[in-house]
Amino acid sequence: MRSSNPVFSRRGFSRGEGYAGFGGGQPQTQGLPQAGNPYAGTNPYAGTNPYETTYQAPPGAPVQTGRMTMDDVVMRTAMTLGTVVLGALVAWFVLPVSEKSYGLAIGASLVALVLGLIQSFKREASPALILGYAVFEGIFLGIWSKILNFMWPGIPLQAVLGTMAVFVGMLVAYRTRLIRVTARYTRIGMAIAIGFVILMFVNLIAAMIGGGDGLGLRSGALGVVVGVIGIALGAFFLSLDFKQIEDGIQYGAPAKESWLAAFGLTLSLVWIYLEMLRLIAILRGDD
């Protein structure tokens, strides 16, 4: 599943691009991620505050202006992640999942992917799409986790704890400014992410053609290295989420944008969880 957060760069959270949802001009397209490459062309730190020119009014309290607050983000994120967890529990305890339920997992992941892509390319947040994505993503995660649990009992709990540790660690690092999200930091991270996604796609094609693990990037010592890089990229995506949420609150993003904040955070956490599952599986036995 896709797990980056190109959604924010399309939403006016950044300082350099106009917000297409307000004002009378044409939608801004410069710097937007291109189809098939969600990481390309983002530069969220050049220019001025788009909300100042949008509202053309002095800053006001969120209650007066309908602007996004941290409470909005926390509540919407709890709803979205809670829906993911609920879907996973349904898949785990209700659906007839066996060690060979790959087709069921693939079907749920494809539905989640389609819903996520539709939302990513919409100009406005759609709670129905986001929660629909969360349901099917949760079902996929529940099925996939249970399949792996048949082979390595306890692995889902280990992956959940690992994901929580990465989230808390990145939040602390961001809040204490140990990590500073600058334009250079973003460009380097995006370049690595693009290379990683391309490499994983090539590995998938090689596996489909030749069978096995393709190029051998998901097993053995090399698989461990790739898994660590994947988790590090998920942590990088979280840092971008934190920065863009902070900017959205500071520069007056509308309250409805909190749904997109929740969507972006969910994408990053799903990415980390899946990479954590794979890494632990490699460490506990040949993947």
Image: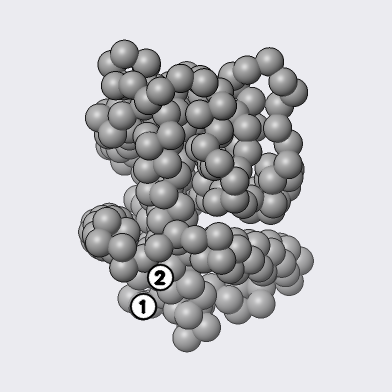
Residue 16 vertical placement versus 73 (above, below):
below
The x, y position of residue 237, in whole percent, is 46, 55
Cα distance, mark 2 to mark 1? 6 Å
What residue is shown at x 55% (from left), y 23% (from top)? 54
- Quarter assignment of residue 17: top right
Q: Secondary structure at mark 2?
A: helix
What residue is shown at x 28% (from left), y 34% (from top)? 70
What residue is shown at x 32% (from left), y 59% (from top)? 174
Q: Are marks 2 and 1 in contact (CB under 8 Å)?
A: yes
What residue is shown at x 40% (from left), y 23% (from top)? 58
Which residue is the site of mark 2?
Answer: 279
Q: Is residue 91 visible?
A: no
Q: Nearer the viewer, residue 85 or 180?
A: 180
- Tag 2: amino acid: Leu
The x, y position of residue 72, in whole percent, is 30, 27
On residue 101, the disc is none
Q: Residues within 10 Å of mark 1 (few under 14, many from 20)?
A: some
Q: Is residue 25 visible?
A: yes
Which residue is the site of mark 1?
Answer: 283
Residue 285 vertical placement versus 205 (above, below):
below
Q: On the rendered structure, is 260 left or right of 36?
A: left
